Image: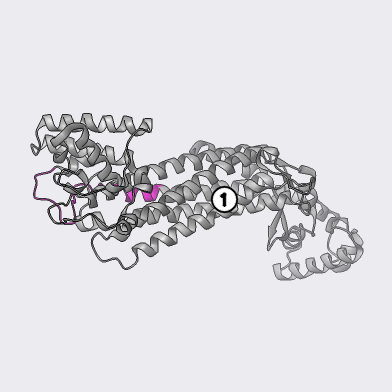
Amino acid sequence: MTANSNSPGHLLWGGRFSAKPADLMQAINASIGFDRRLAREDLAGSRAHAAMLAACGIIEAADEEAIRRGLDAIEVEIGAGTFPFREEFEDIHMNIEARLAELIGPAAGRLHTARSRNDQVALDIRLWVRAACERTLDLIAGLQRALLARAEAHVDTLAPGYTHLQSAQPVTFGHHLMAYVEMLGRDAGRFRGALSRMDECPLGAAALAGTSFPIDRQMTAAALGFSGPTANSLDSVAARDFALEAIAAATICATHLSRLAEEIVLWMSPGFGLARLTDAFTTGSSIMPQKRNPDAAELVRAKVGRILGAFTALAVVMKGLPLAYGKDMQEDKVPIFEAFEALELSLAAMTGMAGDLIVEESAMARAAAAGHATATDLADWLVKELGLPFRQAHHLTGAAVKRAEALGCELWELSLADLQVLEPRITGAVYKVLTPRASVESRTSYGGTAPAQVRAQIARWKESL
């Protein structure tokens, strides 16, 4: 574009610069390729700002009405895909302002009174992140409900409990799924906390020092759904910690999703064979016709890398920046957009998989019984019934496991005589605690795997959600 005195783009700083930017400078400086996604937020902020300017007598009511009509027309154009996004206007703010001037004439120039692109973009990205966090909370709740439904269906289903990926103690599959409901609950808490801390409106901070115009920042804050305005103009335009906090919460949430995805991958493998997904969430192989690959789970497992990368990218951008605004901060948007795109897709995919998962109950029961998983129950019985110190009971149980391994049988298949060789006072009553079912039903402590406890937790979460 050739700069001239009639160019809206040139008018933004034409009094200081006489030549147009070099092509390379234009390429590195322009952000309209990605910040056009902030159009809705930019329009909302401009409407609130114009209404406040008119209410405070800073601009005429007729100008505010023209600005509002022009912004409404722009919103229609953007929605219809006819808005003329132009790279020469750099960003979404200048594109909208230039188009507004084309639509309503000189009144458009009054919109930028008492504000800067610095507080404008700080507002836009805060509005976008706020909406993203709210969407994420809805998606988390949807996944929790899907997991609750699946957990309720498998309150009594025996499943292997692992530590170090080795057989540890039997649990129920419902109890296992409820662990992820708890994790997601904490994720939701982190997003709610982030929302509470970003609940301040930066509009009115202007470039960095506030403004001499008699503006009403409480009015714009209320109009945009904030509890109040930010309290320091420098911090208002310089802060992106609200975005960092939101992406940190997204990273932790994605880590939880990745753990569940990894378990689905393991459960589906022939070595485990504990669960499967239907064609809806699996793919085949281009060369091996027998394959059913858990690609959806694998991709969810991988998305945490993209989200963590976004957090790292934004943290590096912000590290060491002096107050207040630096053009570096233009690089905040792509990581923010990418992080929430990846997280929202992952949450939706995991919700689908939670509903699609088919549990192989007989295989689960066999796995729950494998590896002498009720050894701790034997040790506990020796403590409770015979009064042995736990360390002595632990030693005797280890000897019983060794004997079962030598005979090639499970712990509960040892004869009473075999057990009495280790401890003569053992009676036949011990067999009541040595089966996986008995083990599970005995774990009645709060938060334990006993079906009654799992049902109570499911009821609590249903009430909460």
Residue at horizontal 83%, vertical 63%? Answer: 425
Toward which corner of the image does residue 16 lie, by quadrant?
bottom left
Q: Is residue 446 shown to the viewer in this render? A: no
Label 1 CA crowd tier, 10 Å (few <14, some 14–19, many 20+): many
Toward which corner of the image does residue 361 lie, by quadrant?
top right
Q: Which residues are magenta?
A: 192-215
In this rendering, position of residue 33 left or right of residue 346: left
In this rendering, position of residue 330 left or right of residue 361: left
Disc tally is 1
Q: Nearer the viewer, residue 265 or 16?
A: 16
Residue 100: x percent and y percent?
22, 36
User: What main secondary structure does the magenta stretch of the protein show?
Assistant: loop
Protein image colouring: one colour
- The residue where tag 1 is placed is 257
- Amino acid type at circle 1 is Leu
Residue at horizontal 41%, vertical 44%? Answer: 132
- Farthest residue toward the front? 2
Tell whether position 289 is magenta.
no
Residue 364: x percent and y percent?
76, 47
Toward which corner of the image does residue 63 lie, by quadrant?
top left
Q: Is residue 23 shown to the viewer in this render? A: yes
Check the image and report above or below for 147 versus 252.
above
Q: Nearer the viewer, residue 59 or 194?
A: 59
In this rendering, position of residue 442 left or right of residue 131: right
Residue at horizontal 79%, vertical 53%? Answer: 369
Residue at horizontal 77%, vertical 60%? Answer: 375
Residue 300: x percent and y percent?
58, 50
Q: What secondary structure is found at the residue carrying circle 1?
A: helix
